Amino acid sequence: MKSAKTSEPLTCKDPALISYRASLDVPATTLEAVTRWLIAHRRRAGARPVQRAASARVQALLVLRWFKEATTLKVLAADAGISVATAYRYVHEAIDVLAARAPRLPQVLATARAEQRPYVCLEGT
């Protein structure tokens, strides 16, 4: 293939990442809530240093993409401009924050009984 402006062939000397905008099928309120929870987690005593590689919003996006699209850590890290190790730590930290806010099984069953639900679907992953 020839370049449009010159007669020299096109070559790929340095592969480059192509960035693009994408949509995530998650309500904005979910992103806002997870971001708030992560900010609160980061402010607690004993948390990692204030200076972080990415904002709480970016961390929320990482974990939401992890759950919703099963995006690999390598891709998440590249998109966020952080290392794979940091992406791994951020995703698992966010999972811990979400898990701490999740209702416990007895609470879920009591609510289902009170609402007279005929069944409850439980996901074990």
Image (cartoon, helix red, strand yellow):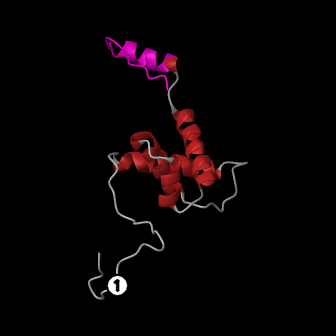
Across and down, in percent, residue 61 comes to 45, 51
Identity of the residue furthest to the bottom in this view: 6
The residue that disc 1 covers is 8
8 left or right, relative to 104: left
Is 26 rendered above or below residue 57?
above
124 left or right, relative to 114: right
Identity of the residue furthest to the left in this view: 4
Nearest to the observer: residue 101 or residue 122: 122
Across and down, in percent, residue 23 comes to 32, 54
Is 119 rendered above or below residue 78?
above
Q: Quadrant of residue 68?
A: top left
Q: Is residue 38 magenta?
A: no
| Circle 1 Cα neighbour tier, 10 Å, few/some/many (<14 / 14–19 / ≥20) | few
Amino acid at dot 1: Glu
Across and down, in percent, residue 81 comes to 53, 63
What's the magenta region? 106-125
